[in-house]
Image (cartoon, rainbow, N blue to C red):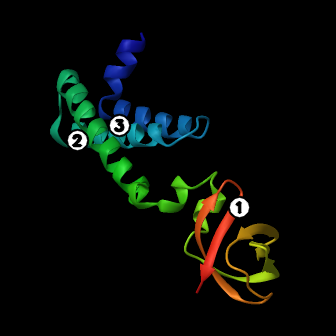
Amino acid sequence: MIANAVTGLGAWTWIILGLVLIGLELLSPGVFLLWLGLAGILTGLADAALGLSWQASALVFAGFSVAAVILGRMVMRPNAQHDTQAGLLNQRGQALVGRVFTLETPIKDGEGRIRVDDSSWRVTGADRFAGAKVRVVRVEGTTLVVDDV
């Protein structure tokens, strides 16, 4: 009975499957089913245009699925390898290296403080007066090592 309904729908079977997969995407995390749904819709259109057998339709769906997933990965992650900030997600101090800040308190006996956004960081370096511009050269634990600009 179900097989008769599926074969009776013809190309609409693939289009309905594609729409169901896209609808399921709303219930699942990620965007993987979206690309499979797109492949299903494209298979339905190809089946309607060419009158494919169910075996040929399955192969076309497999090909469209692979192509859609590869295309989707390229579209969704164009610069993932070049994103330097993502690599420093839990290393905020490392993300500050090279940046210039104004001393909040003077550096006396090699220690002082700078303000970064809403937090205050301990710095070490040569003695300098409050308000001097310094560049972060490296991080040692939770202390920033600074030098003249």
Is tag 1's residue or tag 2's residue first in the polypeptide sequence? 2
Q: What residue would you read off at disc 3?
A: 40
Q: What residue would you read off at disc 1?
A: 143
Q: Quadrant of the N terminus?
A: top left
- Give the quarter of the image for residue 46: top left
Q: Quadrant of the C terminus?
A: bottom right
Q: Residue at x 16, y 39 (%)?
A: 50
Q: Amino acid at mark 2?
A: Ala
Helix, strand, or loop for circle 2? helix
Is tag 2's residue or tag 3's residue first in the polypeptide sequence? 3
Q: Are marks 1 and 2 in contact (CB under 8 Å)?
A: no
Is residue 73 visible from the viewing direction of this image?
Answer: yes
Q: Amino acid at mark 1?
A: Thr
Q: Is residue 135 left or right of residue 2?
A: right
Tag on residue 6?
none
The residue lying toward the viewer, choosing from 90 and 73, is 90
